[in-house]
Amino acid sequence: MRLVFLSIFGLGFWAFIFFMLYRLLRYFRGVQEIGPLLAGKLLGLILVGFFSILMLSNIITALSSFFLARDLDLLASAPVDWLKLYMAKLIETLVHSSWMVVLMAIPMFAAYGVVYSGGPLFPLIVIASFLPFLMVPTIVGSALTLLLVNLFPARRTRDILSVIAVLAAGGIVVMFRLVRPERLARPEGFRSLVDFITILRGPTSPLLPSEWVERAVMSWLNVKTDLLPYYLLWSTAAAAFVLGAILHRSLYAKGFSKAQESGERWAHNGRMTRIGTILLRPFGIVRRELVMKEVRLFFRDTTQWSQLILLGVLVMVYVFNIKFLPLRGTGLTFFLVNAVPFLNLVLAGFVLASVAARFIFPGVSLEGRTFWLLRSSPMSMKQLLWSKFWVGTLPLLVLALAIVGVTDYLLQVSPFMMAVSIFSITLMTLGLAGLAIGFGTLFPQFETENAAQIPTSFGGLIFMMTSIALIGAVVVLEAKPVYAYLSAQAFGTPATTSDMVLGFGSAGLLCAAATLIPITVALKKLENQG
Amino acid sequence: MIELRGLTKRYGSFTAVNNIDLSVPRGELFGFLGPNGAGKTTTLRMIAGILRPTSGTVHIGGIDLAAQPTAAKSKLGFVPDRPFIYEKLSGSEFLRFVAGLYNQEGPQIEHRARELLALFDLEEWRDELVESYSHGMRQKLIISSAFVHRPEVIVVDEPMVGLDPKAARILKDLFKEYTRRDHTIMMSTHTLEVAETMCDRIAIMQGGVIRAAGTMAELRANAEDGTAGLEDIFLRLTGENAARALVDVLNA
């Protein structure tokens, strides 16, 4: 069942990427002269993105596979040859950090192959160029991790890496926005066609393997023979491997030993505990202790809160894009101006669903091995779930209201649309948090140590799909009364209150059901477990 | 104080615990012995309310655990066999959190927590995060957490594993003093010497059933040889082909 579901979802995802790219490439193909250049440039941009993701994920994965994995004690005490260990761990790192990029690359290369008639040998060309492209970041990332672990203890390194990775990811997003890749599709924005073609012809980053893969693939598709990129790719991978192996032999034993040391970590208390104790006093001892525990665990685990930085960057990018929407000027109808804040609700809903997936969904899973304590105590599972619900929901609600409030302010929406937005986003937030707690409990990942991996599980996928359905349903239910109201405003047609009550009432009921039903079902499961 | 009636736990077709009847009165230190996979941990986890029995009942202090779990569990402290606790809490925060789960707080809890940490030589680690504790230190912290809310019954699974000799000695004295004060302790152990010297009564489990139960004198009397030690009785009841297997293994 799970396999079938995942296969359907995966195929759907592949089909989506394939057809999007297929249509775009067909369009490029129809453009004289610059068409192939545009296709190559697009491929180069995607590959640079892949390369950045691969570098980051390899550095983080290498830390786990080379220094923190559970099998390392056994391997370190066994008479295993250092080169074999290095290669085995390198392959493990490569597979764990690259599978997602490979999954995304398959439909992408397929689209290029189909549109430019790559022929039956095209997959081999892709493999011959893409494999060393995956190997280089794995070897370089592992070497960087090795150097870092030799400088800091592994647990500290993990904290430092999480922050670096997140800042770097945020930086990539911001840079991507600054480069504005979409302008490449609009040549009229350049001073002259010559300028445009010069930019297209010039290599973006001649020293990066992404450029070599692009050259290898595009030369094959344009029926030219260019062997240089293959030499560059394979010789770089081989040289990196040799240097990586030398580094591994001289530094790994020292680094591994250092990785066993845990950084000295003291719990800093005082003001936060006192304020928390006073604020939570009305809720009773059990709830207070549960909430305080959640907050402490969250802020002391760098892998948890560091992703908030990335989230902040994403929200900033989103808000900025809203700010620069050309919503004033001629040719824009009253309806279009008012439809944007409504669509804004959908996008804000998606942001909230991803935040809920990352921070609320893993709540019960993270109790995992400590569940014995909660289950043997007289505390009820109801108290546990609702505490987790409110600890996650209140910050989410603040974020939701901030996103919608600021974007609506920037869009200068009418008071009516502002009220609709705030009403809807509040209900949606409660519904999304309920779904996150519910599905997180129904599909727990008790054995996972890294909270960031939990949302990528099967349960996480179901949660995201249900969330999207909820957001869609709320918007559809509210669309009719909002349209009727706006019509009444614009043309003086009578607006019926029954439409309003029905639309907003049913959206409200749906969100209430999304909040309560999953938590009730989850509660039943927890109470009957064992 | 602990009453088990027809307690059974099945996992699919496998029966881990089969129709156990047992009564442990107030003030008794009761020991569970048995080979690996005998069903001891499953039984203790059912008594602690972590696992639900397939059939049968558990009463703690006369309260049905299934019907009134909150009331029954508030009389109980549990120490699991593996010391998994929140890595990002400090020792003293963990004790405060556990007391909170039992709806207890205030200066008395703080005082008790300090005393317990001092007893197990954890005082200087009290504000350090659990992630830097060793296995034995975690075990000591969990044992402390079972005492911090002063339960009437303590259920403890393999308490001696990972403890240094000094802590093991302290724990034995603590258990004796606790039962002398009319509290009840039920523990499982593989250390026969511990069971023989500490427990008022012992049950030997195998294959999910209790093969023998009683005081040391009763167990000896029931054994064919009236002078046998607990090890002899244990091996006789649970199978003694270990020596033959060893020779085969080493010759293989």
Image (cartoon, coloured by chain):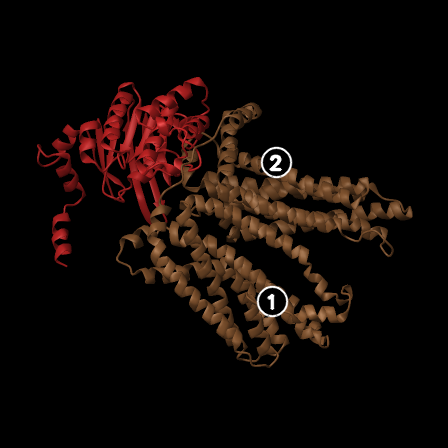
Residue B98 position (above or below residue A433)? above
Please report the residue visible at 10 percent of the width from the left and 34 percent of the height from the top. B228
Query: From the viewer's perspective, is the residue at label 2 or at label 1 nearer?
Result: 1
Q: Disc 1 designates what residue?
A: A44
Name the quarter where the C terminus of chain A is drawn. Answer: top left
Q: Amino acid at mark 1?
A: Gly
Q: Amino acid at mark 2?
A: Leu
Disc 1 is placed on an element classified as: helix
In x, y percent, where is residue A88? 37, 61
In x, y percent, where is residue A442? 50, 46
Label count reads 2
Q: Disc 2 designates what residue?
A: A394
Counting residues from the start of the chain, the first of labels 2 and 1 encountered is 1
Disc 2 is placed on an element classified as: helix
| The label number, if any, that marks residue A185 in the structure image | none
Q: Colour of chain A?
A: brown
Where on the picture, by quarter, is residue B52?
top left
Q: Can residue A12 be seen at all in this image of the molecule?
A: no
Q: With A104 as the anchor, is B2 left or right in this view?
A: left
**Chain (red):** B
Chain letter for mark 2, please: A
Q: With A393 as the anchor, is A139 left or right in this view?
A: left
Q: Are marks 2 and 1 in contact (CB under 8 Å)?
A: no
In x, y percent, where is residue A208? 55, 65
Q: Can residue A319 be seen at all in this image of the molecule?
A: yes
Badge 2: how crowded within 10 Å, few (<14), some, or many (20+)? some
Residue A372 position (above or below residue A49)? above
Badge 1: how crowded within 10 Å, few (<14), some, or many (20+)? many
